[in-house]
Image (cartoon, coloured by chain):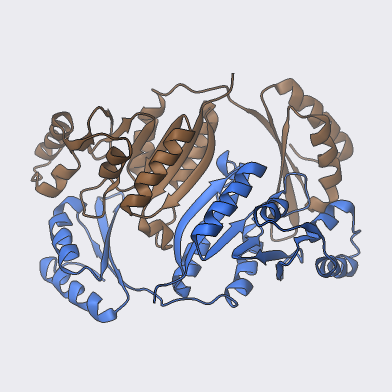
Chain colours: A brown, B blue
Amino acid sequence: MTNPTAAMIVIGDEILSGRTRDSNAHHLAGRLAIQGIDLREVRFIGDDRRTIVATVQDLSAQRDHVFTSGGIGPTHDDITADCVAEAMGAGIDVRDDARAILQAYYDAREIEMNAARLRMARIPDGAALIDNPVSAAPGFSIGNVHVMAGVPRIFEAMLDGLLRQIEGGRQVVSRSFLLDRGEGDIADVLRQLATDHSAVSIGSYPAWTGAGYQVAVVLRGAEAGDLDAVAAELRAAFPEARE
Amino acid sequence: MTNPTAAMIVIGDEILSGRTRDSNAHHLAGRLAIQGIDLREVRFIGDDRRTIVATVQDLSAQRDHVFTSGGIGPTHDDITADCVAEAMGAGIDVRDDARAILQAYYDAREIEMNAARLRMARIPDGAALIDNPVSAAPGFSIGNVHVMAGVPRIFEAMLDGLLRQIEGGRQVVSRSFLLDRGEGDIADVLRQLATDHSAVSIGSYPAWTGAGYQVAVVLRGAEAGDLDAVAAELRAAFPEARE
């Protein structure tokens, strides 16, 4: 049985202009890895109707799940909900259940419900709401597309609830080793290990510490036993490796 | 005259698994904005030959420039150079100019040139080398595709040299205003401003400060005069706005 696959779409001109640094992709990657869902691709795109529609259609057809962040607020540049509805061939309008959630939240805070805020109750026909415990305005799931807010605190809270409802796969097992060497010193050994142990994925990630090069060797696979065999050979070749 | 367009491809399983948080996309976005090159899309993909080849071909056809990061080191999982060569229909082998650069670097440090390190001299036919002032192993440009390292310190150094050789466009002018309000309070005014001033792009970016909501309103356009007009109307509507 293979694990479910996923893609993410980060929507917003502010990311592409360098104004804002996205953090939602990294957060989602970590959460999906724990749940055994394979994140295969992330795309950052701008607030452009045709691009959003085409990207949602493309990735929705390719993956088991598509997660989006950004563009579901009350302002004129928040066009994600309408674009996702169009991509999925669904109608969209203010929906009573979403409106009731917003109305209760604003009533409790004596905030006026205006036309702009009401836009956040626009939900595609047939979509299931995603709870927003931070600021009420819901996200939604339609087909295999899960639409969430861009503000990290809200994105993370929405994802928390959503992931409890999505079936995961088998979590990958991993072991990680650190070496104070350049990659060029260990590449031949790693290549041989990768050839000999096809059930284990062996990644090599160099970094600069300020004092010199360091490399992290990460073993990943479905079975702990497979990893143990590779780890033993790695330690034999590089006894100084720190796990 | 419109500005040149660009896309970026961030290559590496470690990004999609959540192990590593990419910083190169945000760095590139900021640098391209200053140079007047419109970054239209970023894709994070894994170390998979077919995916890399298809993504390079797709984006190379759509944009004036494609920037890649990751996968050009000496280990078995570094397959970017070969994949880009395949995508661009070029042959690839160890090239004398790249080998000479590496040999000089290793000779000066009394490091042995082995088969793994020599892989970093594999450069597609017809490609121009991109200087690596940090660790010598060069990147390269072939057609409109610019291939750079994933380690941020090296990526940034390579980009620095590369961007001096790429013609930019007209830098976008921007002004930014901060308001201690929710987006729902200002959305109607912003929508009217956006309708009245089509030459100015008006972005609205909410954030949570811990004490309450804040929203940044960012005006972007080609002409400072257009921005001044919108800024004056924005200040009239929200005198407390801080620029």
Question: Left or right of B74: which side holds B177?
Answer: left
Work out which residue is located at the far front of the displayed protein and give it. B89
Residue B196 falls in image quadrant: bottom left
Q: Which quadrant holds the C terminus of chain B?
A: bottom left
Residue B208 appears in view: no
Residue A160 appears in view: yes
Q: Horizontal and vertical percent for residue A95?
A: 16, 33
Q: In this view, does A153 lie above or below B150?
A: above
Q: Which quadrant holds the N terminus of chain B?
A: bottom left
Q: Which residue is drawn at 40% across and 73% down?
A: B2
- All told, the count of numbered labels is 0
Say which of B201 and B59 sits in front: B59
Q: Horizontal and vertical percent for residue A225?
A: 75, 21
Question: Left or right of A152: which side holds B35?
Answer: right
Q: Is residue B238 above or below residue A161?
A: below
Q: Horizontal and vertical percent for residue B110?
A: 91, 64
Q: Is residue A219 above or below residue B115?
A: above
Q: Horizontal and vertical percent for residue B206?
A: 28, 53
Q: Residue at x 64, y 68 (%)?
A: B157
Q: Which residue is drawn at 32% across and 76% down?
A: B222
